[in-house]
Amino acid sequence: MNCRKPLAFLKRDFHIALSYRFSFLLQLTSVFFFILSFYFISKLFGKAALPYLSSYGGDYFPFVLIGLAMANFLNIGLTTFAESIREEQTMGTLEAMLVTPSKLSTIILSSSLWNFLFSSAKVSIYLLLGGLLFGVDFSRTNLPAALLILALTTLSFCSLGIISASFIMVFKRGTPITHLLTSSSNLFGGVFFPIAVLPGWLQNISKLLPITYSLQAMRHAVLNGYSLRTLSHDLLALVAFAGVTLPLSIFIFNIAVKKAKERGSLAHY
Amino acid sequence: MASAIQTVNLTKKYPAPYAAKNLFSAGRLRESFTALDSVSISVDKGRLFGLIGPNGAGKTTLIKTLCTTISPTSGSAFVNGFEIRKDGAKIRGCIGLISGDQRSFYWRLTGKQNLEFFASLLNLTRETAKKRISTLLEELDLTAQADKMFQTYSAGMKQKIAIARGLLSEPAILFLDEPTNSLDPISAGYLKKFIKDNIVGERGVTVLFTTHRLDEIEQLCNQIAVLDQGKVIFSGSVDEFKKTMHLSSYYVLEVNNIKYERLLNLNNIPEIKEIQIQSRPFDTFSIEFILAHSDSALPSVIDQLVADGGKILSCKQEESSLEDIYLKLMQENGQ
């Protein structure tokens, strides 16, 4: 895949997003109000949450700020592929793309780029606001480790997102994977609270979710500046997860495309 | 003449409406619906081939199968020399598809932005894309509107953008799936002229054209195929089609000064194959009839009418329209 196609998709989506200027601005400004709410919630907790947050520096606001930022990536990774397919199907543009020599995988991956870019911009705003307005200390951040964690997290979430897109390709509506993973990740993955507050048997569910390792590693890398060696346990878990789910997702997606071609329903919705 | 498109016993059976049991069972497709049944057609290079048939006959399935977005159940098909199962990407590199569905564009982008986007999917370099888009917009008289949002275009302009997109890759073969569907007569006329003079005439593109408007087939196509319930029930030239159905012409006689009962004597003339008598004002009758084998029986018809006291007001020979022939064929095929 050369860069021209992904760039064409980015340009297309940028122009479309810009044509809805008001919504574009609203999405960016909502970030501020969202994290402001959590800032005041953290004031409410004060030092009461300290026993659970000691390994992350003891303050709730930086903890949840990183949780929210990573949950953003989780949501995009899980939903963007399925949503892109569904949107192109309903707009009637998928068929027009499918009669070009471009591969379906290129089309689907490139269609999702804008969402990732926009989400990254939102996450940057989260972190910038956290640092500049709310005094979160990022001075100890291990940036290379954080970027590696982000890449592995994106790969893991995208694999699940591709499986979710396979459902859309065949069933057209309803992605059980997205629903199940989004709710379970928010509840058991440690987005809003440390998993240590969960009963022991529920913590076992947390260990099956990639976001648990992503969040743990990211918080340690950003707030405590842990080295790659110290983070190796979480990183290996993410590598193993991506190593299994990525080939599996590609396999399932290919079956879904084959089925849709047999049914003549590639562009149906 | 070499074939641009060739299908051999191409069959497509759609599985039954969604059943979870079929999800991972490619070989067990039950209660299927046959959309294409052993379709064998051949389209010569540089020709305009018309595909006609009632709704649900399989025209769109055939086009989508040839465009490789639907996989066939059995049989084979070659598009520009490439096999549809093995060479999907190569086929998609040398074809264009224009349908009557104007939803296939981004309505909040301009016409030009739409074309630039699809040009990148067609693997065109930036320079080539720019040059071709500019030429096509000019040829289609769209340069002035190119930077306006697609959603502001009229149906005719939207279809012109669809044509420009179909021609961007300079395809060897163009599939036109009911392209004049939503167009007014002026826009449809422009499009037909552009297809005939520019796309086929100047560019030498092979065109496979589906439509419900039989006058378009008559005006445009060199070869035709009639599909019904997934089967090809005729394939050949328009003239051959007319000859096959023995409906190349019919006669219309206007007579008066004769009673209706007397006109029924015409049924005794064995050369008259089909006859219709209609009453007109002022005791006049219009008689339409087809002669079975030759025109030599016409004097016998006139003699009979005169002998029965009729006064011949006019007599003319009319060419059967393609629509008459098509309707007759469908009637014979049980539609």
Image (tube, coloured by chain):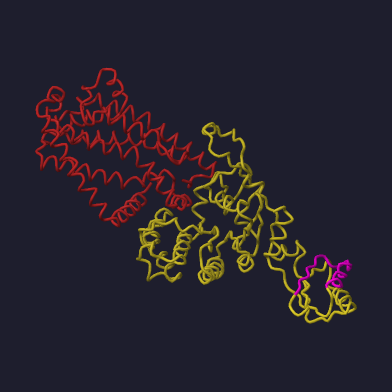
Residue B75 magenta-highlighted: no
Magenta residues, as a range? Answer: B260-279
Label the yellow chain with its letter.
Answer: B
Q: Residue at the location (67% across, 46% down)?
A: B38
Relative image position of residue B191 (x, y in whole percent) = 52, 68
The reply, left or right, for residue B151 in relation to residue B7 is left
Q: From the viewer's side, name the closer residue of B251 and B72.
A: B251
Relative image position of residue B96 (x, y in whole percent) = 50, 57
Q: How many marks?
A: 0
Relative image position of residue A181 (x, y in whole percent) = 34, 31
* Quarter holding residue A237: top left
Give the drawing colour for chain A. red
Q: Evaluate whether residue B301 shows in this view.
A: yes
Q: From the viewer's side, name the closer residue of B38 and B95.
A: B38
B105 shown above or below B310: above
B161 shown above or below B76: below
Q: Residue at the location (44% across, 46% down)?
A: A103
Q: Evaluate whether residue B173 shows in this view.
A: no
